[in-house]
Amino acid sequence: MSAPTERPSPEPFRPLAFCRDCFRPARPGATRCGTCGSPRLLAHPELDRLAIAHVDCDAFYASIEKRDDPSLQDKPVIVGGGKRGVVATACYIARIHGVRSAMPMWQALERCPNAVVIRPDMAKYTRVGREIRALMGELTPLVEPLSIDEAFLDLSGTELVHHGSPATTLARFAKRVETQIGISLSVGLSHNKFLAKIASDLDKPRGFSVIGKAETADFLAPRPVTTIWGVGRATAEALNGMGLRTIADLRRAEESDLFRRFGVLGRRLKELADGVDRRVVDPSEEIKSISNELTLDTDVADFRELEKILFRLSTKVSGRLKASGHGGFTVQLKLKTPDFKGLTRNRRLADPTALADRIFRTAADLLRRETDGRRFRLIGVGVADLTPLEFCDPPDLVDEGAGRRAKAEAAIDDLRRRFGADVVEQGLVFTPRPKPSPKGGDQGQDAAGNASSDDKSARRTKEP
């Protein structure tokens, strides 16, 4: 008796155009699905070959609040603190009115006075983020989280497992998140991480954008240099001063000139301008430190102004340490001068810490030694040599004041967990709403008010 013949595995579903609602193949050039009538078609000549994706939830916090309260669906929603707090995120209706993340709440409410303001519920958002992360893990083991609501995925070699190309698998995943979890997300698909992240932001919300290898150069050429990671306002101004305004300009620049002006960053800018990103999606990348940094809108020399910003950064770093269950032995201060020269100072502590008070005091002492009249365009603080939280901040038998400050910080942490991050603000950093300027005068702000925060530098560095 002959052995039964093994049936060959079905060929994976690899269309170059398909419907994102019913997943049926679509005709090239069609504007609607021939099966379900949906206009949500995805088509690209490389759709069957690309596998690197960036998945980004749409207005994550606000979307969760709308999911949990359907009466908010057609209303502008802002998640954040009170009038003296800042916007954590805003739904797309509020964004139409000009509301943006990190905007002072008083300004957001001036632009959108009918907005519904909701205090952040980080425990709920973290829970939903973990649910989405678990679904990502079913697609591929190569998931590299960037924050609570976004991640890179590498779906290379998953076609037979999911009976379809990475593009179709991602489209099914997006629909599953909407159906099962109740929020939407956007997908960027390309041949490397840099381009996948750009793609995910092209068609929000509920977007799915593709950048293929063949079109990379033409796609990037007309875009401003600020499209590239690492190019903030000051770097863009420096590039513009060199006559480099678009990525095409940057591509034509000599790498040696860029390296002399910007150091290692210059070499990196040149590669990204060419569409080259050699980083792999690495789910096992160990976090060796936790930090926050700010690029200032104007260069600052005054210690007191820098100290205010440093306190805010220290508080953020402390919160992220505690949330991750870590503390660290080494406090790091990072500064950058207007000519892009970096300066890093470290101090190793006798005992590891996760306390904002201790991080700030240590970093402020390091900062005081460097504020000698020089101006700085960037300031950052971090904690390295991480260790489990239970080994951190033992009782200080010498400094009784440290013990009292630690208890006060624990009480503040509890209030923030219950009522939101902005329920308590220290006098050191309190900045009231500016008074109307005198007639004919200009409204001013101090350097702390002018600082622009990039919380994704606090990841390993969108909300869109």
Image (cartoon, grey):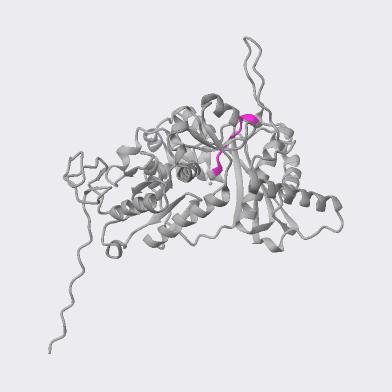
188 versus 329 height, above or below: above
Residue 80 shows in the view: yes
150 versus 201 height, above or below: below
Q: How many marks?
A: 0
Q: Residue 371's x, y, as percent?
A: 73, 36
Q: Residue at x 69, y 33 (%)?
A: 374
Q: Nearer the viewer, residue 319 or 301?
A: 319
Q: Residue at x 54, y 49 (%)?
A: 459
**68 sits to left or right of 215:** right
**189 sits to left or right of 404:** left
Q: Specify the quadrant that holds the C terminus.
A: top left
Is 453 colored magenta in this rendering?
Answer: yes
Q: Magenta segment, which residues?
A: 449-455
Residue 229 shows in the view: no
Is 154 colored magenta in this rendering?
Answer: no
**Looking at this rendering, what residue extends furthest in the front direction?**
71
Task: Quadrant for residue 279, please give it.
Answer: bottom left
